[in-house]
Amino acid sequence: SQQGEEDPQALSIQEGENATMNCSYKTSINNLQWYRQNSGRGLVHLILIRSNEREKHSGRLRVTLDTSKKSSSLLITASRAADTASYFCATDVQNQGGKLIFGQGTELSVKP
Amino acid sequence: KAGVTQTPRYLIKTRGQQVTLSCSPISGHRSVSWYQQTPGQGLQFLFEYFSETQRNKGNFPGRFSGRQFSNSRSEMNVSTLELGDSALYLCASSLDGADFGPQHFGDGTRLSIL
């Protein structure tokens, strides 16, 4: 079963704009991770935020985590055409070590 | 450092056949996980191995099995293939899954069932 629900399912923006994707989950987690997938390729890890952290930055990426609302958001600032991809959140669920549960993903299209 | 290597990249089989997919993790990584990705169900966890032991298993029928060798390489096997098994099968490795950190994914094996 899917742990994460992501919205929007699809997002289309212009280069230079910011893109925000949201993820909600159902059960207690150890950490939450964001991945990117280009068409036909494997997933690339972007950022990991632990359950005791509220915000994390990595380059143009900003991730927030609200464990009380069981939700996270990924912000990509100053988007580029190369950011076009699918983005997934994944949770490392407490007491279910050894696996990640993925959301359905957000398909981001950045137009030049 | 070489990334996660999955072979073959593409595979076409017919219903009822069986298939074996291979995954070579990043050198030094001892945890290997497998996922199935389909347009309808998304990414679903199959199983995870650590030091040749299956530590966790997803909700898939017994036709799906796997193993890990002493060099951490892993294989997954699907027997009696069904049309619904058509999917991208992804393998991921990490140093240690105790605190499940960043997973390094291969580019997957695209399995098509005719």
Image: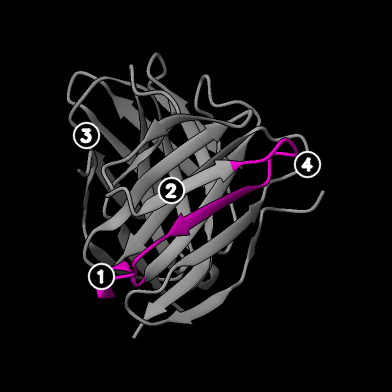
Question: Could you tell me which residue is drawn at 21 percent across and 24 percent down?
Answer: A27
Between tags 1 and 4, which lies in front? 1
Query: Marks 2/3: CA distance?
Result: 28 Å
Please tell me whether residue B31 is drawn above or below residue A80 in the rendered image: above
Query: Marks 4/3: CA distance?
Result: 33 Å
Subunit of mark 2?
B
Q: Residue furthest right?
A: B1
Residue beneath label 2, please? B65
Q: Quick one: quadrant of the N terminus of chain A?
A: top left
Within 10 Å of disc 1 (Cα), the crowding (few <14, some 14-19, many 20+) is: few
- Three-letter amino acid code of the residue under disc 1: Gly
Within 10 Å of disc 3 (Cα), the crowding (few <14, some 14-19, many 20+) is: many
Between tags 1 and 3, which lies in front? 1
Q: Residue B84, labelled with which disc?
A: 1
Residue B82 among magenta residues: yes
Question: Could you tell me which residue is drawn at 55 percent across and 36 percent down?
Answer: B102
Between tags 1 and 2, which lies in front? 2
Count how many numbered circles sit on residues in the image. Answer: 4
Subunit of mark 3?
A
| Residue A106 place in picture, x, y as percent | 30, 59
Residue beneath label 3, please? A25
Residue beneath label 4, please? B27
